[in-house]
Image (tube, rainbow, N blue to C red):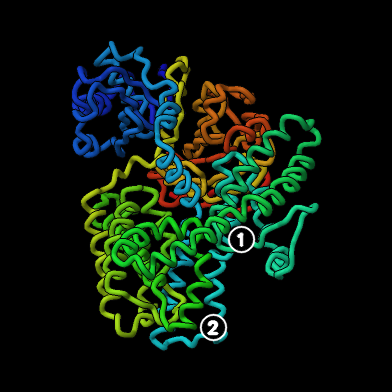
Amino acid sequence: MHSAYLVSFGFLAYLKIGGISLNHQETANKIVEGVGGAKNINSVYHCITRLRFDLKDNGKADKKQLESLDKVMGTNISGDQFQVIVGNDVPKVFDALVKEYPALKDSKGGEGKEDKDNKSKNVISRVFEFIASVFAPILPAIAGAGLLKGFIALFVSLGWLAAGSDTYRIISAIGDGVFHFLPMLIAFSAARKFNANPFVAAAVSMALMSPDVTALLSSGDPVAFLGIPVTSVTYASSVIPILLAVWLLSYVEKGFNRIIPASLKLLLVPLFSLLIVVPVTMIVIGPLGTFIGNGLSGGINWLIVEGGLVAGIILGGAMALIVMTGMHYALVPVILSNLATVGFDKFLPLTYISNMGQAGATAGVFFRAKDKKLKSLALSTSLTALMGVTEPAMYGVNMRYKKPFLAGMIGSAAGGGFALMFGVNAYVLAGNGGIPGIPAFIGSTFWYAIGGLAIAFVVSLIVSVLLGINEETVDNADIKEVNETTAAPVEVVEDVQIELTNETVWSPLQGKAIPLTEVNDPTFGEEMMGKGIGFVPSKGELVSPVNGTVMNVFKTKHALVIRSRDGVELLIHVGINTVKLKGQYFTAHVQTGDKVSTGDKLLSFELDKIAEQYDITTAMVVTNTDEYKSVAPVEFGEISMKQPVLKVEV
């Protein structure tokens, strides 16, 4: 057997022969060379997938050289920490590195450093990153529905589809459904970031959007709750109110979890949380955007009419932020009045121009990005924005990387200034702020309108390309597992050759099975460690999904590795960032080297206590995915233990 410092549980491909392989040693030497040499290293340690360097000068690191290495998946800078992403082999590369440079073996770098990095970020950065992380999981639904909305608008404008037909209404419902009920998706996703119960968060959004509440608030009659006035607000398609509501829910839940006995939490915590959060949202939080919008609408309308170039620059550049807050809805009555009384409106062109700016900025990401998935996403969402639906581009790409969002605002300011300087008008409410809605501009200022749209797109694209992006700086690109340098050496099972065969992997948990891509951590969600499946457990017990051998039990007992008799290598990680619990609330029932059968208890954990602090979503990954022709989930939804969840085929 071999001994190793198990700072990463993603270890399976241990040595076939004794000692450090030349391959790992060569990789380690090239990595040291790539980060600027040993003299440039203050300290180094490693976590689940990466080497974490505290360098004297990050500028001396050659990212291009490092990323060209076979065993290096990428690089990342988090605060001042330079990270080299290696994956499963990170323990062996680390061992090879400290063998060559013994002085680095006991270096302690970065403990608690990420928390400091997060605190050092300015408020705007934290807000952008939070909004992007909330929207990232729901992006597929938004992107698909948004693209459909763009196509249906185009088909109607070309006369290929009759507006109002049964087919039109059904397809429209498919595209509009996601956006109409967007608060529900946001509530669920935001709850995972705020560590609130996602199902209670969804229940809050459902209450706000229930038909009876909608009818009550839109009736025109005074509404009160326990004598307190309730302002009329439409929550459909809103963003900010539900984010604030879930933020409030997270604190309310934590408060009740502290004072309510464990035996009553399941019933009373959701009950009291709903009774407090929904009314407070309706009375205070929900109306906030409306109050701000009503207060600004008069000034904005004056600027649009009288401000000319300056107004166009200010409003064009700020339009994306105005749309985000929902304040643009306050101007809808003004727009309708303008069209009815004078026959044109000057605000609508700015919404089109903002769309073109976001589309151009995302197109710039397409030309600048190296990652194929990001290029594909940028291209598709840019086209969607051109069709009038900017949410996928704005939330999925531009805000996620910040600089493209700024580029979109700069381009929109340029296009808006041009448009209002020449008095561009919209003559009809086309219902679409993209290319399909261009007929709304047909009139005396048509070509100036086209010029404003073109300027916004081109300027945003150019600025986006010039500013560039750092594809590895998004916060969710790191699993953030720290303090692992103190892990004591553990015994690991010697690797043996196994002839792989087709195999069924059974559920290790009771709860809900979800796609691995929905696990809120890119190391798992982006399948960096391999294909697999995720779970939202409803019971704090983990059992063996296969007949096989326990390869590693992580020191903090939140994760382990099993190899089946037929060769499937499984990494099971309970929760996100639960390594920080340092074993609290976890009990291991097996040790490294134990033989287990399907259904044998591996771990038990206090689900409720862990869920109060961390996302309890659990990942099960086939780390030797590359050795199989197919690794596919069997089914999603509610599952019980020892139910088939994965099929692997050679």
Quadrant of res 411? bottom left
The tag earlier along the polypeptide, 1 or 2, is 2
- Kindly identify the amino acid type of the residue bearing the numbered disc 1: Tyr
Tell me what residue is drawn at x 76 percent, y 43 percent. 272
Q: Alpha-carbon neighbours of circle 1 within 10 Å: few (<14), some, or many (≥20)?
A: many
Report how far apart the C-alphas of labels 1 and 2 lie in the structure: 27 Å
Identify the residue under disc 2.
167
Expressed as whole percent of the image width and height from the top left, the position of residue 124 reads 41, 42
Q: Secondary structure at mark 2?
A: helix
Which is closer to the viewer, label 1 or label 2?
1
Tell me what residue is drawn at x 25 percent, y 25 percent. 28
Label ID, residue 235:
1
Expressed as whole percent of the image width and height from the top left, the position of residue 196 reads 63, 41
In this view, 159 is above or below 149: below
Q: Alpha-carbon neighbours of circle 2 within 10 Å: few (<14), some, or many (≥20)?
A: few
In this rendering, would 453 be left or right of 600?
left
Expressed as whole percent of the image width and height from the top left, the position of residue 424 reads 32, 75
